[in-house]
Image (spheres, rainbow, N blue to C red):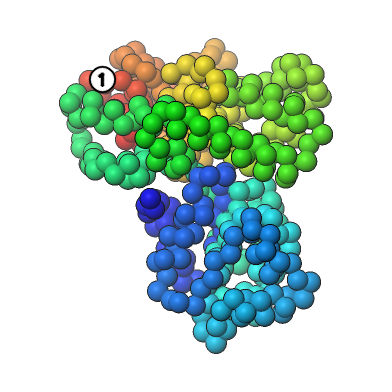
Amino acid sequence: MIIERDIYSEIKKVIGAPEAVIVTGMRRVGKTTLLSYILDKIQSENKIFLDFENPLNKKYFEEEDYEAVLQNLKFLGLDLSEQGYVFLDEVQYVKNIPSVVKYLIDHYQIKFFLSGSASFYLKNLFNESLSGRKYIFELFPLNFREFLRIKQVNINFKNIKKISLAVFNEINRHYSEFIKFGGFPGVALKEKVQEKQMMIEDIFSSYFQSEVKQLGDFRKLNVVRDLMLLLMERTGSKLDIQKLSRELKVSRETIYNYLAFLESTYFISLIRPFTTNRDIEIRSMPKFYLCDTGIVNHFTKASKGASFENAVFSALRPAGELNYYQRKSGVEIDFILNKTMAYEVKSSPYTKDLNRLKALSEEIGIKEFRIVSRNYTELQNTIYGFQL
């Protein structure tokens, strides 16, 4: 089933611009489906779709002479006398693609839509070769609104000021499934638990085989695997490089390299500490979160609290810059969004939690704050994870 992803509203604004549209994200988050959705929305027959996981399609763009690439596009049916649209999926498999796209954008009426799963490749090479000629959009697993959409569940709760217990219980049935199995579209579309579990294992295997083995080219694959498992068990924790180095028996530099790769291919995300000029707090250790709660819950025995916090992180991530704040005493704020809004994640919040958050937020100059609750509560200034 194809649904409209929330990010489409932003992509739609630049479809008429000459710059290339680049969609990047982890494997299996729906990039190919999104490109297909955009393709169908474009009111023109002068368009081509090529998937570079197919070796035969790669050959069309592996020419040393870029004019030969143009001739290949003509052979495929592109009319150069009018505006053309070329969709290229999984572009990380063609090394010279940024240069080819730059040349064709500069010399011909061709609008490119590109997708790829290795963001370190896309961001670095496309930044160098397509400076001023691209828009990059990051696609993540389904958020809860999209999850309801793909499940064909019609619940309109965004504008409800006060959620009653009855409404909470109805929404929570679906939200509990969302947290447990995550937001990968292929998992959400499965109905049976066993099918969902098999799909999660397939997604992890696909990531490890295609990204870690092929693109990472690491000598110690077993160490990368063990690092990934350790991270899954500790989602929401601070990165202790020295401890990871000791446990895995490799150098800190090696750990840094592996973490950089896992972050740049969307398996993990790091958030840095929020600091102020008047306080010297814990600055060195970032926190990390996993790409999806379904992977966390399937491969580890993570607590419900850790899984929920990861879900809140995933919901907030597309909204802007995220930080966390912690005093030396250990008192902390889980998330600060765009340096203006504080969020504290609680399974069942109490008044003392709200008072502590209010006081700590005011100390660091944050005026807006909310408790994000997993369970039903009557507490004021509190929202639920499904409302983010």
Residue 340 visible (yes or no): no
Q: What residue is drawn where x is 53% and y is 44%?
A: 28
Q: What residue is drawn where x is 48% and y is 21%?
A: 306
Which residue does the numbered mark 1 point to in the structure image?
377
Q: Is residue 176 above or below residue 51?
A: above
The x, y position of residue 145, in whole percent, is: 34, 42
Secondary structure of the residue carrying numbered label 1: loop
Q: Quadrant of residue 107?
A: bottom right
The x, y position of residue 338, in whole percent, is: 47, 40
Graded by Cα atoms within 10 Å as few (under 14), some (14 to 19) or many (20 or more), the crowding at tag 1 reads some
**Amino acid under disc 1:** Thr
Q: Quadrant of residue 233?
A: top right
Q: What residue is drawn where x is 40% and y is 37%?
A: 190
Depth check, front residue: 159 or 150:
150
Q: Is residue 319 above or below residue 228?
A: below
Relative to residue 3, is residue 263 drawn left or right?
right
Q: What residue is drawn where x is 51% and y is 55%?
A: 32
Depth check, front residue: 303 or 76:
76
The x, y position of residue 81, in whole percent, is: 55, 87
Residue 8 visible (yes or no): yes
Q: How many numbered discs?
A: 1
Relative to residue 159, is residue 42 drawn left or right?
right
Q: Quadrant of the C terminus?
A: top left
Q: Quadrant of residue 165?
A: top left
In this view, the residue farthest toward the bottom is 81
Q: Is residue 105 above or below residue 308?
A: below
